[in-house]
Amino acid sequence: MTTPQNTLRIDIVSDVVCPWCVIGYRQLATALEASGTPHEIHWHPFELNPNMPTEGQNLQDHVAEKYGTTKAQSADSRVRMTEVGAEVGFEFHFAGDMRMHNTFNVHQLLHWANQQERTHDLKQALFTAHFTHGRNLSDDSVLADVAAEIGLDRSEALAVLEDQRFAADVRAAEKVWLDEGIQGVPAMIFNNRHLITGAQGVENYSRVLQELTKENS
């Protein structure tokens, strides 16, 4: 897809169960709105936990196993994420029974939504479903419900997940970014040239946009 001249192309590699992905996007979106920067956003798949079993895992247990954090450290991190999320208008509701999910089917659904130019809307709805409402993204019927709530066809969404028709496409898309060396998310690529990783904060994104605007002009 060709990006119009003077329009900033932003490719975002992320996963919907990554809290810093939604925080980073919201920070970037705030900076984009404030600066009035013409832009196009393209979302790309990344699985934080490709080996996660289908039924998922308790979030606190998962974080302790993966990162070696104590319960106190994990609790402090969730408080910090909740505060930073609130600063950019996103609500985190962490609960003791919250689960980490395998997101391969999520990315297949997003791939399908992309064919209808609705990836962005579905991505935001899935962030909210997981982090704000604690919905079970391991359940295909829940994923189909979320798709329907933004106006997509529920029965077709369910069929896409049941027959796995986009499995190979998602694997190929994931491999592109892994081959590019992307190992953590969010990873944001500006104009196919400049890579920024992590949630950088509104002020830092604003500075980046200023520099890129000069480059584009």
Image (tube, helix red, strand yellow):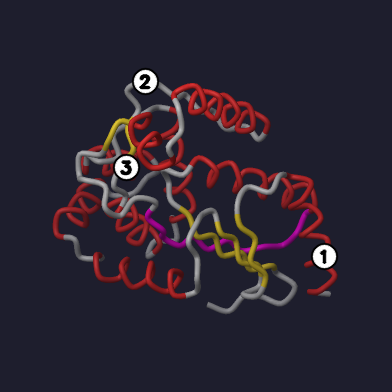
Task: Give the residue number, with chain letter if any, for mark 1.
Answer: 211
Q: Nearer the viewer, residue 183 or 7?
A: 183
Q: Please, what secondary structure does the residue beneath circle 2 have? A: loop
| Among the two numbered marks 2 and 3 on one chain, the one whose residue lies closer to the N terminus | 2
- The correct choice, above or below, for 56 with respect to 12 in the image is above
Say left or right for 170 vs 179: left
Q: Is residue 166 magenta?
A: no
List x then y, in percent, for residue 56.
25, 39
Mark 3 → mark 1, Cα distance in angstroms: 40 Å
Task: Tell me which segment is drawn in magenta.
Answer: 36-47
- First in sequence: mark 3 vs mark 1: 3
Please name the residue shown 70% across and 69% down the image. 7
* Residue, disc 2: 96
Give the Cα separation between the discs numbered 2 and 3.
Answer: 28 Å
Of badges 2 and 3, the one in the foreground is 2
Q: How far from the left and from the top, in percent, is residue 90?
A: 57, 32
Name the amino acid, label 3.
Answer: Ala
The amino acid on which the numbered mark 1 sits, given as a three-letter code, is Glu
Sooner in the amino-acid sequence: mark 1 or mark 2: 2
- Tell me the kind of residue under disc 2: Gly
Q: Nearer the viewer, mark 1 or mark 2?
A: 2
For mark 1, give the secondary structure: helix
Residue 58 sits in quarter: top left
Closer to the eye: label 3 or 1? 1
Q: Which residue is mark 3?
A: 148
Residue 46 is covered by the magenta coloring: yes
Q: Say if 77 sits above or below 206 in the image.
A: above
User: Counting other residues with Cα less than 10 Å from the Cα at mark 1, is it few (<14), some (14-19), or many (20 or more)?
Assistant: few
| Quadrant of the snapshot with the C terminus | bottom right
